[in-house]
Image (tube, coloured by chain):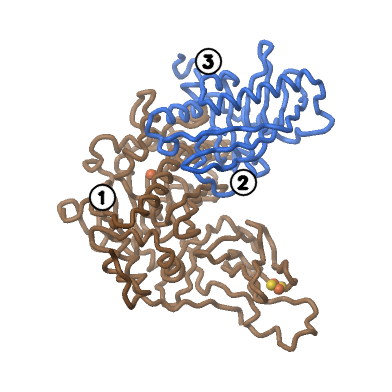
Amino acid sequence: MNAPGMPNHDPSRFSYYVTDAFYADLVAAYTDWQRDDRVVDDIAVRERVRLLLEREARLLDQYRYEEWLTLYLPNFVYWVPATPDGGDPRVQVAVTFDDRRRTEDRIFRFRTGYAWSQAPPSRTVRLIGNVEVFRTASPTELMVRSNFITSEFWDNETRMLTGWAGHRLMQQDGHWLIQCKQVNLINCDQSLRNPSIIL
Amino acid sequence: MLQRSGNGGGYDWDELVQPDRVHRLIYADPEIFQRELTHVFGAVWVYLAHESQIPNNNDFITGKLGLRPIIICRDNDGKVRALYNRCTHRGTTLCRWEKGNSRSFQCPYHGWSYLNNGRIRGVPWPDGYAVDFRDPKFNLAQVPRVESYRGFIFGTLNMDAPSLANYLGPIRKPMDEWIDRNPGGKIVVCEANRLKFKGNWKLAYDNSADGYHVIYSHRSLIETEARFNDGEKGMSYYKNSPDKLAMYVAYTGNGHHYKDKRPNLQKRDGGLWAIESFHPGMEHVAEKLRAQLGARAEAVLDYAGSEPMNINVFPNLSLLGNHIQVIEPVSVDETNAVWYGTKIEDVDGTIGDDVLREINTLRMRTQEGFPNLGEVDDITNFEQIQRGLACLEDEWIYMNRGMDMPERFRTDDEGVIYGPATDEVFMREYIMKWKRLMQSEPQLTVQREP
Ligand code: FES
Ligand SMILES: [Fe+2]
């Protein structure tokens, strides 16, 4: 682990990567990306991406957070905008805008045994569909849109959380890893009851 | 068990609200909730909006006064109004958007239209009517008294209510301090973390100055904040003997109260930033600003820190950290708790655009922390109180911490009561105020433009 002031800070411990440039790059990547002329129709690529999303859904449903985190780059963002257009996280609060450390905080919190909003924990089943993959200007970067229906059983009832996710994937050592997961709940700008699971 | 009698809406309010405890019905009875919509959310000054949400003429947002749908707008002459969002023809809501800019509103049902000062502008085929549409009864109803205190807009339907300034009374002092810590005493409301829970609205109001729940309801967050063992962060003040620390709770009258943790801070620039727990980008921004601004960086970083005050303005406004929390009753056992984020402006040009942008971005991230990792546990507990209230024979809820222990309190010349941070004195006092409101018979009116 690196002390502050050293060049390579452990992103689990220190938050140095969420910089101006990081935000600017992120906002640009999530602007005007779902374009028909960029759809990837290569079945093999689409299939790999679909498998990645399905694996992510399964790992989250099974609370296997360490394995889930291996699907992500070290410097990632888990982002749930509070406005249906996604908004700009530099000037708006989001429902959630977590870097790696805060994501690990969230997981740590679940496991303290005192996270009342998740004691007992929600049971979830995630259904993913309409997976579309989009090219970007970089050959080592893809954008993915998928729709989701997450059934969440909590506090004696089952509810449905639904929307679409925008995954930003980057290729590293031949693997596609998630650099950002933007989760767009269709009711993101409305009052949410106990929004404490990782979507 | 409690019986209903003949007056004050049929309830024996002194039986329901006792010095040390309250009856379950005040949280669970739909008829009491109905009465609150007039006797509380009607009879006292209720927070409606912040002026920064409607900065320009003809800006509007929609909201609620209790359950009454309203449009809060700045009319074409710049006057702030709270119009009933209800067509005078057959009652349809006029505006279904959350915000916008419009000089007029046209009813989607038959097309009657109104100016944003509430005057009717026209109706389709008026020749089919024998009435004179200049009769004021066709103008929109509006909240007769709308006043602002330093950007915070309140309204009441009660012509007998005191002025807003008098109603707020001594709670203005902590409000002023909360406002004035920002450059030029200015904040701008931005998006919100919006939560809801299946519980009575008072469960949220009981909670926000409650220093007693922190160590346990927020235990998961306290443990999370301490997971790297690097000093006092966030809520760590509550760990050992919170009542022995300098922080305190104060009841200022009319149901208003606040908890003030500022006396625990180190008295220096950066003292607030020093206890901030972990947020995305914080080390990067802090290092960058320190390199850029030197010693001045500490005071700037404090703008992104969460002000350690919980200021509660009865019945529906709380200033918590940098948030403006608005409590919206939905039904007797359903409530929205909307945590509006705020950002600062470089009013006197001393911060500079780049630094302002960085600090506001960081402020967005610090504001997301508590609703995500803390408030969800509280609202879960509020819901579980509501569930516990189903135990019909187990009728009482206690608010007696610190009671009959006069050595724990001090009262100043203005009648403000100060006590240790975990005390329930503010709860006992505000609920007495609530009881007096519920016992009263307020005259509520709406106004229409002449
Ligand atoms: S109800 Fe509005 S025009 Fe008829
Ligand atoms: Fe709390």
How many residues crowd around disc 1 within 10 Å: few (fewer than 14), some, or many (20 or more)?
A: many
Amino acid found under the numbered disc labelled 1:
Asp
Q: Quadrant of the N terminus of chain A?
A: top left
| Chain identifier, colour blue | A
Q: Nearer the viewer, residue A16 or B354?
A: A16
Instruction: Name which residue lies at 77% across and 24% down.
Output: A137
Q: Secondary structure at mark 1?
A: loop
Residues at marks 3 and 1 touching, judged by CB atoms closer than 8 Å: no
Give how far apart the Cα atoms at labels 2 and 1 are. Answer: 38 Å
Asked whether residue B32 appears in the rendered view, the answer is yes
Q: Quadrant of residue A34?
A: top right
Q: CA distance from mark 2 to mark 3?
A: 38 Å
For residue A8, which numbered disc appears in the image?
3
Secondary structure beneath dot 2 equals loop
- Work out which residue is located at the far top of the displayed protein and give it: A173
Residue A92 on image: x %, y %: 58, 42
Residue B290 visible? The answer is: no
Q: Amino acid at mark 2?
A: Asn
Residue indicated by mark 2: A187
Lower position in the chain sequence, tag 2 or tag 3: 3
- Which numbered tag is attached to residue B423? 1
Give how far across and how far down residue A99 sits, in percent.
Answer: 54, 28
Side of B333 where A44 appears, left or right: right
Disc 3 marks a residue whose amino acid type is: Asn
Both marks 2 and 3 on one chain: yes
Residue drawn at (27%, 52%), measured in percent from left and top?
Answer: B424
Name the residue furthest right.
Answer: A37
User: Which one is in front, B395 or B158?
Assistant: B395
What is chain B's hue in the picture? brown
